Each structure stands twice: as C-alpha cells, then as structure tokens.
Image (tube, helix red, strand yellow):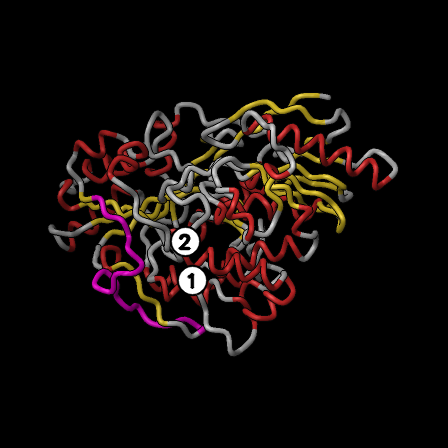
Amino acid sequence: MKEVLLNLGLKKFPVKVPTSTETLAMGKVPLLFNPEQKIRHSLANPIDCPPLRTLVEQKLKADPEAKAVVVISDSTRPVPYSGKSGILYPIIDEMVQAGLKPSQIRVLVATGTHRPMKEEELKDMIDPRVFSLGLEIINHNSRNPEELVSIGKTELGGEILLSRYYVECDLKILTGLVESHFMAGASGGRKSICPGLLAEESTYILHSGPVLASPNARDLVLEGNPVHEEALRVARMAGCDMIVNVTLDSKYRLTEVFSGHLESAHLAAFSKLKSYAAIPFEEEYDLVIGHTGFVGVNHYQAAKGALTCLPLLKEDAICILAGCHTDTDPVGSTNYKRMIRLLSEKGPEKFVETILAPSWSFIPDQWEAQMWARLFRKIAPDNLIYCTSDIPEESFSWIPGRDARTMISDAEDLRDLVEKSIDWAYKKLCLSLGREPLIAYLPDGPYGIPVKEE
C-alpha cells in the first residue's frame, strides 16, 4: 500500500491505496509571485481592450454619474477575492483612483440559479477593504421578475431575461475562474453572464436535453460546444467592457491573471488552462478513485467529479467518489431531487429518452441529472461507490449509486470510509477478474481532465 492525498477543498487527508495505483495528476504550473502587482499590471495592460482606468475615464466623460458593476462568482468557485492574491480590491481601487465614487460602484454576485449568499458567507469570501468602502453588494435573483429585464432572443429562440442590476450599469466588469467545465468546456468569461445573471427560465434552452446531448458539451471543449456558443451569444448581447479572469493550480493558488476583451482574454486563459489541466491517458481502468473537490458542496455539484472519472472507466469498472458536502442541503434543490429520483427509477437510457422527447416539459436542474446519466450509461449504478458522511443514508434509496456506508458499517470517519471502500473494491475486482485490477487515482478531482491520447 501507499499513501495519496485526498483534497476535498475544506477537508484534506491522506488515504492508503494499492501500490499499483497510477496517479493521474494535472501538470505542474508556476505560481504567480507578487500577485497584487501582477493583477494591477494586467488591469493596466489588458488583452484587446483599453486599460481599466481609461475605461472609467471614458464613461465618466460621457456621464459624470455613470454607474459601474463588478460581477463576482459565488462561493461554489474558489476565485481569490481576498488575501494577497485577491483580484476584487485592486479592480475597485483602480476604478476609484480613476474617479468613480464608491457609491457609483456595485458588486453583483452571479449566483445563476444557486441560492443567494448569506452576509457572513460574503464576508468570508470578499476582501474586508471592499466592505469598508460601503459598496452596494447584491445577490442575483434568477426568480424575481422585478429584478430582470429582456435583452432579446438568441438563435436558439429563447427570450433572454437578465439582471437589471447589470444591464442598467454603464461600465461592466466580469470576474471569474477559468477551470474545466463538464458542460461548457470551461468556466469564466461569458459564463459570468450566462448563466450567472440569467433568469431561471432563460437557462432552460442552455441546459436543455438536446443541447446537453451533444458529445461536444464536455470538459475542455469550446469549438462546436453548443453550451459555450449559446452562452457567448448571450454575453455579446448583454455587453461587457472587461473581464478579469484567473487560473489556479490544483491547490487553488493563483497561476495567472487575464484581463481584457470578453473573448480574447478568455481564450488566452483557456489556452493556459489546457496546458496543464488536460491529463493524457492511453487505457481504461478497472477501478477509478476520484473526488468532488472544492466545488462539491452537495450531490448536485458532485456530478462534476463523477464525470471527470468517466473517460477512464471500463464498462464493468468500479468508481469510488469521495465528497465533503457543506451546503445547507447536501443533496440539492427540490427539482434536482425530483430529477435524480426519476433517473434512479427509469435508468439512464429511459431517462434520457424521456427528457429528449418533444412532449417533455423542461424542469430546472434536470441538466445535472442528465450528466449523472452519462456516467450510468457506462457503468451500473451499483458500481459507483459514494463515500460521504453528509448525505442521509435513507436518501440513497432514491439516489443512484451505492452508499459506501452500507458496505462499511464500522468506518470511524470519512478517511476510514474511503480506505475501506478502496480495499473492498480491490478485493472484489481481484476475485472477479482473476488478476490485479488496473487502478487510477485522480488527485485533482473535477479539475484535472483525462484526455485520451489519439
């Protein structure tokens, strides 16, 4: 046996795995030293757009009372908004230095369809210097029609309702993290607007069954990805003066800052991401051990970790997935529970047939259940061993997959549960295969993406 580190974001601990286990990790990438200096340099020397101070001066010349909005991600993304690598205070300070009063600047949290962030959560995430300026900080609410305005329709036909707190501002700045995304190819850039600031019903086409059925709606693919393309169309309609996006390493440390034009700066960040997030592999494995990472605050978000394992799995393989779910509901929304129950009842093939049928009425959060269906179309639900202490045991009567606690009744903690699950799967596979199984461990969870070598 040997030890590997299991890093779940808020929890990390070593676990023992069989000696033959291959660790498939992201490439190493240099950290960004003197981060605040580099952040300010990026704001003064952006890609394909004027410096931030120039943008502010232009808006104030046109209207001395001009309003600015800085869009930030919610707590499901480890964007550095405080500390030495924090990007938010330098952005706002540059805007103030260029002549904007704090009362002319608002911070808008792009929650998408997620729940609003609480005040204490915002204070934990945002640099205290930002709070000391007395800025207006608003959670986007995708379900309140009074806070939404129409900006037209896209080629796919849906009306785009967007946060009025964004649309009504004169200067629009987007911030975010560019990491791999299992539907849109990569996060960041246009995703701060779409789906970050959309009305719930405007997300339906973006997340519809037919769109997500595309084989290009997957990690590290932008070209031909219908989710990316629709999000970009919406973001162009909404307008954006500058993005400030970052890339991080596997320990959530800053590796680069990309400021500039919505598309050019995002593509530059995406190129950087691919250079170390793509993990080449040649063969599939009998046992794959993964985890849900920082983003896996609940079962809904855990799908990202599961789909990362998918390319590595043989059809009769076992997947062990570990998660630390800190959200108020460790499973997800009422709609998500309804859809995951439907997936469990129908099985993956019938489930996908159902949501692709013309008669199907779209249900919010069905998209994440559709992603889980991708996994279960390759391996049987019982071959997913789910290791967590946060989801109630009775929930696994309708959540597809096997609760590790039903096999390991004497586990002392999450670490013990993971280790004993690995041992159980290893022995089972040795017996059924008549040989030692091929085992892979993904230390980066949903952030390192296996890409099969051609």
Tell me residue 18's x, y (percent): 74, 26
Residue that appears at 21% across and 50% down? 58
**In the rendered image, is residue 449 in sight?**
yes
In the rendered structure, which segment of residues is drawn in magenta? 137-156
Dot in front, 1 or 2? 2
Is 75 left or right of 378, judged from the image as shown? Answer: left
Is 404 left or right of 76, judged from the image as shown? Answer: right
Q: Assess disc 1: are there few (<14), some (14-19) or many (≥20) residues with their C-alpha within 10 Å of its C-alpha.
A: some
Tell me residue 161's x, y (percent): 31, 66
Residue placed farthest to the bottom in the image? 359
**Is the N terminus in the top left, top right, bottom left or bottom right quadrant?**
top right
Give the alpha-carbon distance from disc 1 to disc 2, as whole Å.
9 Å
Residue that appears at 53% across and 32% down? 250
Q: Assess disc 2: are there few (<14), some (14-19) or many (≥20) residues with their C-alpha within 10 Å of its C-alpha.
A: some
Is 81 left or right of 209, judged from the image as shown? Answer: left
Residue that appears at 80% across and 36% down? 437
Quadrant in the rendering for residue 26: top right
Marks 1/2 in contact by CB < 8 Å: the verdict is yes
Q: Secondary structure at mark 1?
A: loop
Name the disc covering residue 364, or none: 1
Name the disc covering residue 333, or none: 2
Name the disc covering residue 11, or none: none
In the foreground, 297 or 135: 297
User: Measured along the vertical axis of the image, is residue 390 above or below residue 310?
Assistant: above
Tell me residue 267's x, y (percent): 49, 49
Upstream in sequence: badge 1 or badge 2: 2
Q: Amino acid at mark 2?
A: Ser
Q: Is residue 140 magenta?
A: yes
